Amino acid sequence: MSYSPEDFTDQSNKAIAQALEYAQEQKHIELVPLHLAHVLIEDEQGLARQLIKKAEFNVQEVQEAVDLKLKKLSKQDPPPSKIYPNSSFMNVLKQAKKLSKQQKDSHTAIDHILAALYEDSDTTSAFVSVGLSKKRMEEVIKQIRQNKNVTSASAEQTYQALEKYGHDLVGDAEAGKLDPVIGRDQEIRRCIQVLSRRTKNNPVLIGEPGVGKTAIVEGLAQRIVHQDVPDTLPRRLIALDMGALVAGASHRGEFEERLKSVLKEIQSSNGGIILFIDEIHLVLGAGKAEGAMDAANLLKPMLARGELRCIGATTLDEYRKYIEKDPAFERRFQQVLVKEPSVADCVSILRGLKDRYESHFGVRILDSALVIAAQLSNRYITNRFLPDKAIDLIDEACASIRVQLDSQPEIIDQLERRELQLDVEATALSQEKDDASKQRLKQVKEELAKIREELKPLKLRHKAEKERVDELRKLKQKLENLHVKMAQAEREKNLALVADMKYGAIPDLEKKIAETEYRITEENKQQQDRLLTEVVGPNAIAEIVSRWTGIPVSRLSQTERDRLLKLSEHLHKRVIGQDDAVDSVAEAVLRSRAGLSRQNQPIGSFLFLGPTGVGKTELAKTLALELFDSTKSMIRIDMSEYTESHSVARLIGAPPGYVGFEQGGQLTEAIRRQPYSVILFDEVEKAHPQIWNTLLQVLDDGRLTDGKGRTVDFTNTIIVLTSNIGAQYMLEDVENPSSTGKLSQPIKDRVRLHFRPEFLNRLDDIVFFQPLSFNQLSSIVHLQLQSLEERLKEQDISVSLTDKAIQSTLKKSYNP
């Protein structure tokens, strides 16, 4: 028989080519069936391994039996330039082809070759030596084939398609791999109702990313395990992996063939399987090529007839963008809206997950940490949704504590580094003969002895503390495993084992955990300077939020209250001569932070009026420093650059299709990167009125939609607009203290004439800055001198000015 590649599947041809390569590598003189057996079993993703595992044999043992036979084959060194298959090898291929014809298959597949390998005495001997008989092999081939015919060169990929391209969520729930689902009863019940319909029994979960759509499906899987669903509902829930389904489908029709094989398996289960497709919008267009159908068109007929029960999950935007455009696909699904949980619900969810995280990381999570995680994530991480962002906070805080537990404490690390440095120095000095070196060597040895004396008890303490933490971790993991085993025993109706665990092993272990935790807590009270801490508290959560958002930890803690109470005092120190303006701004910020102002608005919005150089920008900088700990937290936008109506696109980004669309807007991008900042719109009167219209929604709702359709949050910003309108009226009465802080009527009229009423009404306050008097300028000079002295100190230069020199300079330069 001659070998014709077109008669074999792609996988079979690949295996034959690899067998030839392997025979050449081993310097064998001919190609025998054992080479083919070796490469088939060696392929980790191959069908041969699946069959051996399904036959309940050890793959490694079968591989070793084949390799043992291969070692007995004769070798030639140097190897022959070309080797040929022997008659036994060709007979195996002939028998495989014969089997494929008997089964009315179009191609000879891997399973045909495996069955034909038993025609070779050496291969049969290897297989039988580990107990893998021909009969057993034919049985498992039949199970995997499921009476399917080989109709293409990629046929092996359709065998057990659900196992290959799907993931059994009910199996995960039985094994205790899924996290507990707290709440969401209403959504799960709605899913069960839709799934129980006769036709169009396909719910689609729609909600923002991170609100818990996948968790609802996992909750359904757990209810199926606990038999808390109607009898009419299937008992298998398979999550389809669209990535695996599309990956590697290079030939036309290959993707469709894979999906059809998945659907055929579901159909043959007679409604016994629910299919879950996460990111279901990917189905529309998946696998589509010229002259080919996408996945959605293959699903539609089965969805319409009720032969396929499918749960989908997608976001609101993607549902609108993809699924609503295909009404024929959309009408086959029933919407289940998944809303973001409240902070209180989120705390309950975190409490439900607490044990899992404690067991995994070997740490203790305080309840206050869970509450803080929900509150801080809701307040400060505005571009994501609960409970996902709160769970991520807990996860990262636990990971941070775990890393500290597994690392060397800082004090021991520093001492060991110093010990190493001194060791190197002592070795170098011991080779010197001069008196200075000998004296230094003596000092080094004394310091080394002192460090080693200090290190010894620290290392012992560290070891003891780590052992206690590790002991607690192991106990918690053991408890979690016992709970999983007990749940499994309950399902299997093994009541003796359940009783033994419920009233014996689990209470004993819980008691031991409580005793260990109490012992660690008592030791913590007695020993304040512990080297290790296994507790995740509110401070650990605040540090993670600070890392994510750039907000200082002090702002996230209760000390912010003290800082805000002293805000006016700190502003007065930096901004001289504008007492009314400073008090007005400080009061507005306090109102906002006390929760008295309307929600979803910026912290404060002010129009600063006054002549140039009186402290308008300085007050904005000082606000940034006091509230956000850095003058870099001030975003300055010069409104003289926005005099044209089209320049609004520079603020929020160009619309789709225009040049610069990808760059985003100067204002929106700056706030997305730095959401906690003071925004200074300098010389706002020079901007085009269209710009003010854009700012209306920022001042009113604290949000702005950029050119890409993303909503940017301004609720954690302070908006300051500066203007020189009416400056000439202000300069007329410089030394008149009675006019301080009050807008004279002409200035009010000028402001109303220039700005629209709806714009002015949305501002928290219009703040008037007085021209500076001679005495106030003197105080400012002293402040600036202090700043200059600090800068010059770095260069070892000192500067001093007498009061007379200051007064003389001011007299020459003073011009209000």
Image: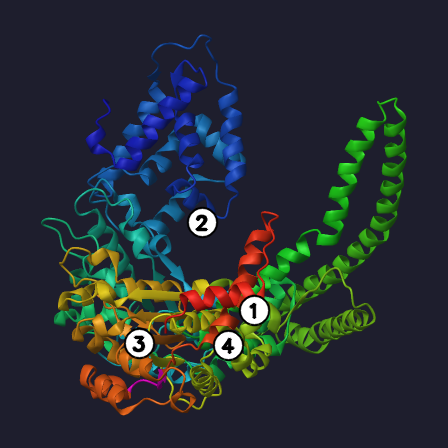
**Residue that carries the numbered disc 1 in the rendered image:** 553
Local packing at callout 1 (Cα closer than 10 Å; few below 14, some 14-19, many 20+) is: some
Tell me the residue at 72%/61% (across/down). 532
Give left or right: position of 787 versus 148.
right
* SS class, disc 1: helix
Question: What residue would you read off at disc 3?
Answer: 703
Q: How far apart are marks 3 and 4 (CA)?
A: 28 Å
Of all residues shown, which one is farthest toward the top? 78
Mark closer to the chain start, 3 or 1:
1
Identified by mark 1, the residue type is: Val
Residue under label 4: 571
Cβ–Cβ below 8 Å for labels 4 and 1?
Answer: no
Residue located beneath label 2 in the image: 54
What x and y, as percent, mark residue 361? 61, 62
First to last magenta residue range: 762-767
How crowded pointer 3 is (Cα within 10 Å; few <14, some 14-19, many 20+) is rated as many
Q: Where is residue 25 in the image (x, y as percent from the top left)?
A: 43, 19
Sequence-earlier tag: 2 or 3: 2
Q: In this view, does 533 lie above or below 251?
A: below
Marks 3 & 4, CB-CB < 8 Å contact: no
